[in-house]
Amino acid sequence: MTPSTSDRLVLAGGTIHDPATGRDGVIDDLWIEDGRIVARPADPSAFRRIDAAGLVVMPGGVDLHSHIAGPKVGLGRRISPHLARREGFPAAVPTIHATGAAYAALGYTTVFDAAIATSAAAMAHQELADLPILDKGIYLLAADDAAVLDALDRGDASDTRRLVGDAVRAGRGWAVKVASPGGSAFWRAGRGDHHDLDTPLPGRRLTPRILLERLAAAVENLGLPHPLHVHTANLGLPGNWRTLLETMKTFGGRRAHLAHVQFHSYAGGDLDEGSFGSGVAPLVEHFNAHESLTLDVGQILFGKTVAMTGDSAAAEHLAHATGVPWASHDLHLSGGCGILPIAYKEKSLIHAWQWAIGLEWFLTASDPWRVALTTDHPNGAHFTAYPHLMALLGDAAFRRAAFERIHPVVRKRSPLVHLDREYSLQDLCIVTRAAPARIAGLAQKGHLGPGADADITLYRPDRDLARMFSLPAKVFKGGRLVAEDGHLRSETAGQTLAAVRA
Ligand SMILES: [Zn+2]
């Protein structure tokens, strides 16, 4: 990691929020040399001074679960302009260049694409090379590979470990993701959904539960920085909270990260809209009691977007449920994915529940250090809506006003009505950078201590949190000013974050 600048800077007199070092609104200077944060130097005269007085200073944002590259996103980009012309959908799937520019203008400096087939890794890296400014990494869907699945089925721990390690090295991955354990095998056999964790995969003895146990062990034994990244079975289905609870129990005390839990926390029975509801309470109780587990929420926000998932069965289910066209894409022997446009509506019973369920997770999970703010971009909402989500968490009055507009049944039955918790600036700093960096295993990111990458965002304090977080005053990446008031100032190339050196 060579520094992109030999500039020495001091951000003088800002209000520092750095949860990892315990600074919660402390006025101090921040010293930067060769792209890193350094301790106060003996001779400060060589440091160029930038006045940060009156500004809130935070580490750059870290998005640990997004979809910005790879075949499914390419397919989404092909669909997106047609939608924009015909149905008034926004460009939910911008070009890779516009994606990086928009993330940087928002104060984000690191992003992970959470679902890349091993066979698509080279192409995804080629695409991500054009993503400006941000450091970036990919999570590999290694368990969709036939050889890995064979080794998992045999229970051959050393072979599994070797094959997964080879895949991560060859694909320059940061982490291993499983998108519905065994899901693509069930899908290809024509048994899309409704399998529980103990139904053997078609033609195998391996069950999804054993797959999760063995794969999580392989990831841990390999010493990867991020634990197994788990999108569990039955995404989007009524009653699926039981599957998520069983998934959490499967890991015992082993570390695991649960992806977009909002989509996995539904009560209710099949095809019965009236029984649909929140299954969050028993899940959050288990989660709060088990420190080895981390999660990202995958919040939905009202508006139009384009959903894309590595889980074809879930896409098909969503398409049937919402009556929209969809496209499916199967990669030979290595997983699949689905694409569909979606408009989340306040007055839709299901969408209102999804919205309330995501917020219920944020407001009842007790330890923000184990929670990452995500919308499963672009599935739950576009990442540019993060400031709106931050306002929903940090401003109870703003949230109540939004709550008053949703479907009346959800207003009556959702526990959200009783939740007054407000995220402080420090809490918002944790769930958008400090926690996702720590959960992802990025030692040099998400904090402002000496040795950290000088990825820094400066905000103007504002009671309107959505406005405050939408338009950072200044964004630094590796010590270089990259954005100012929404305008790009410099287009540095970010680093590829690979867990294993090639
Ligand atoms: Zn996702």
Image (cartoon, rainbow, N blue to C red):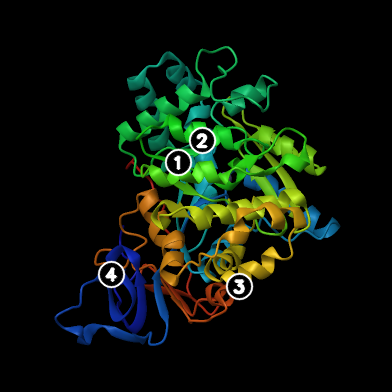
Q: Residue placed at 62% from the left, 35% from the top?
A: 240
Question: Is ligand 1 within 8 Å of the beta carbon of the residue shown at mark 3?
Answer: no
Which amino acid, mark 3?
A: Ala
Quick one: label 1, few (<14), some, or many (20+) residues within 10 Å?
A: some
Q: Residue 19: where, in percent of width, then height?
A: 34, 65
Q: What residue does disc 2 label?
A: 245
Locate the C terminus and report the quarter of the image it occupies.
top left
Location of residue 345 by image quarter: bottom right
Q: Mark 4–mark 3 contact, CB under 8 Å?
A: no
Question: Is ligand 1 within 8 Å of the beta carbon of the residue shown at mark 1?
Answer: no
Judging from the image, what secondary structure is the residue with disc 2 in? helix
Q: Mark 2–mark 1 contact, CB under 8 Å?
A: yes
Label placed on residue 124 = none
The quarter of the picture showing ligand 1: top right
Marks 4 and 3, how far apart in space? 37 Å
Position of residue 302 relative to residue 122, above or below, is: below
Q: What residue does disc 4 label?
A: 37
Q: Mark 3–mark 1 contact, CB under 8 Å?
A: no
Marks 2 and 3, how far apart in space? 32 Å
Relative depth, front residue between 310 and 297:
297
Q: Residue placed at 67% from the left, 28% from the top?
A: 193
Which of label 4 and label 3 is nearer to you?
3
Q: Earlier in the sequence, mark 2 or mark 3?
A: 2
Marks 2 and 4, how far apart in space? 41 Å
Label placed on residue 286 = 1
Quick one: label 4, few (<14), some, or many (20+) residues within 10 Å?
A: many
Which amino acid, mark 4?
A: Ile
Relative depth, front residue between 459 and 41:
459
Q: Residue 307: where, in percent of width, then height?
A: 68, 47
